[in-house]
Image: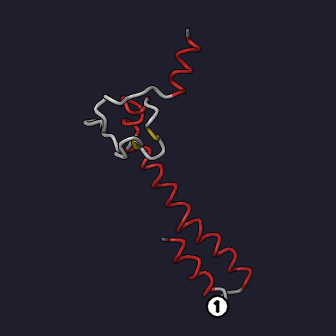
Amino acid sequence: MRIAVVIPAMWILRSYINFELWWVICAMSIYGIIIHPTIIHYKLFEEKNKDIIESTLCSSCKHFDKTAVLCMKYDKHPTLESLPCEGVDWEPSFSEVDSDLREN
């Protein structure tokens, strides 16, 4: 949404600002309005979901998507209080099985 506003605005400003200064303003605007807020929101997302990713049964299941904190089988977000499948459809992820086999 932000990029849909920034790029046309920069295109309009191109005719009003010196071309060399325009590149600097474009780069700063793209970083300040698009990239930096995205990084901040991603860090907040990771911090908010850290406990779910590290300490729930879902995090070790093959149906769990860590990037979206989502049970892909049920298309629901697990919480600390409830699991989408209630543990019935839990299957170990391949990385967990591989680490267990290496230990033995």
Residue sitting nearer the eye, 95 or 8 = 95
- The residue most toward the top is 104
**x and y percentages locating residue 31 in the rendered image:** 59, 65
Q: Name the residue at 33% across, 40% down.
A: 78
- In this rendering, the answer to whether 35 lies above or below 54 is below
Crowd class of label 1 (few under 14; some 14 to 19; many from 20; radius 10 Å): few
Residue sitting nearer the eye, 67 or 14 = 67
Identify the coloring.
secondary structure
- In this rendering, the answer to whether 37 lies above or below 56 is below
- The residue most toward the left is 81
* The image quarter in which residue 90 lies: top left
**x and y percentages locating residue 82 in the rendered image:** 26, 37
**x and y percentages locating residue 60 in the rendered image:** 44, 29
Query: How many labels, in total?
Result: 1
Q: Name the residue at 52% across, 21% down.
A: 97
* The image quarter in which residue 104 lies: top right
**x and y percentages locating residue 25 in the rendered image:** 63, 76
- The residue most toward the right is 20
Residue 8 horizontal side relative to residue 46, left or right = right
Q: Name the residue at 30% across, 36% down.
A: 83
Residue sitting nearer the eye, 99 or 6 = 99
- Is disc 1 placed on a helix, strand or loop? loop
- In this rendering, the answer to whether 49 lies above or below 92 is below
Judging by the rendered image, the residue that carries numbered circle 1 is 16
Q: Name the residue at 74% across, 80% down.
A: 20
Q: Amino acid at mark 1?
A: Tyr
- In this rendering, the answer to whether 72 lies above or below 92 is below
Residue sitting nearer the eye, 19 or 69 = 69
